[in-house]
Image (tube, helix red, strand yellow):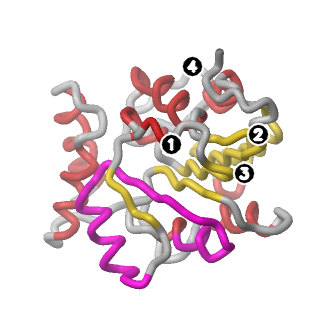
Amino acid sequence: MNNADDQRLATESIEQGDPTGWFDKLYREAADGNAVVPWHREEPNPLIVQWAQSRVGGGGTALVVGCGYGTDAEFIASLGYETTAFDVSPTAIDAARTRFPQSAVNYEVADVLAMPTQWRGAFDVVIESITVQSMPLWVRSDAITAIASTVSAGGTLLVVSGIREEGVDVDGPPWPLTRTEIESFSSHGLTTSEIEQVTAENRWRATFVNNQGDTTGN
């Protein structure tokens, strides 16, 4: 499957009013050997690794958004976090469980636009890496709100995304985030700690903290 096919699956799903349904179609194609999941890495994302290495200690609870085949989730769990990782694709979750049969990660099927209510304010560390950018603009605010809502009092959210200039339209997926969109994570009960523009990777790496324990934005 080439990039045009990837975009075709997304376009068909979005036109049917289902902004996340195309993910499982892609993973099923990949399972049959007819596609490549373009965002999959055999090694954890170096921007996540560098960030984690700069933190003191581990432990607590962690959530990995849009975990795919589980590479980043396994890395986070290796740091001592009680890790939950989810993806909207049952095929991806099945593959992650098969890939890591002895894993301590709790792999779950869930949609970022309809996450379990018990996840609200439940995680000390939340990792969002290039999931929001794979969703169309009209659901982006809802996705950002949902992700921000999972951060516990005193917890931290890490966001990694491609960079898009303000006012520039792109044919996605992906639809990289503008700085304004990155900053909007802080309008949902979180405070901006740092926003980095990593030029070598053409990525945002941003950290937000829940200093007040209000992740609802109210």
Label whose residue precedes the other's in the sequence (2 or 4): 4
Residue type at mark 4 is Gly
Question: Can the viewer see residue 179 in this picture?
Answer: no
Q: How far, Cα to Cα, is label 1 from label 2?
A: 17 Å
Q: Nearer the viewer, mark 1 or mark 2?
A: 1
Question: Can the viewer see residue 59 in this picture?
Answer: yes
- Residue 168, horizontal then vertical, whole percent: 53, 25
Asked whether disc 3 touches disc 4, contact meaning CB atoms under 8 Å apart, the reply is no
Label whose residue precedes the other's in the sequence (3 or 1): 1
Residue 89 shows which numbered tag? none
Q: Is residue 59 above or below residue 177?
A: below
Q: How far, Cα to Cα, is label 3 from label 2?
A: 24 Å
Residue 167 shows which numbered tag? 4
Give SS at disc 1.
helix
Residue pointed to by mark 3: 199
Q: Is residue 84 magenta?
A: yes
Residue type at mark 3 is Thr
Classify 10 Å Cα crowding around label 2: few (below 14), some (14-19), many (20 and above): many
Residue pointed to by mark 2: 209
Residue pointed to by mark 1: 119
Residue type at mark 1 is Trp
Q: Is residue 64 magenta?
A: no
| Residue ranking furthest to the top | 218
Classify 10 Å Cα crowding around label 3: few (below 14), some (14-19), many (20 and above): few
Label whose residue precedes the other's in the sequence (1 or 2): 1
Label tally: 4
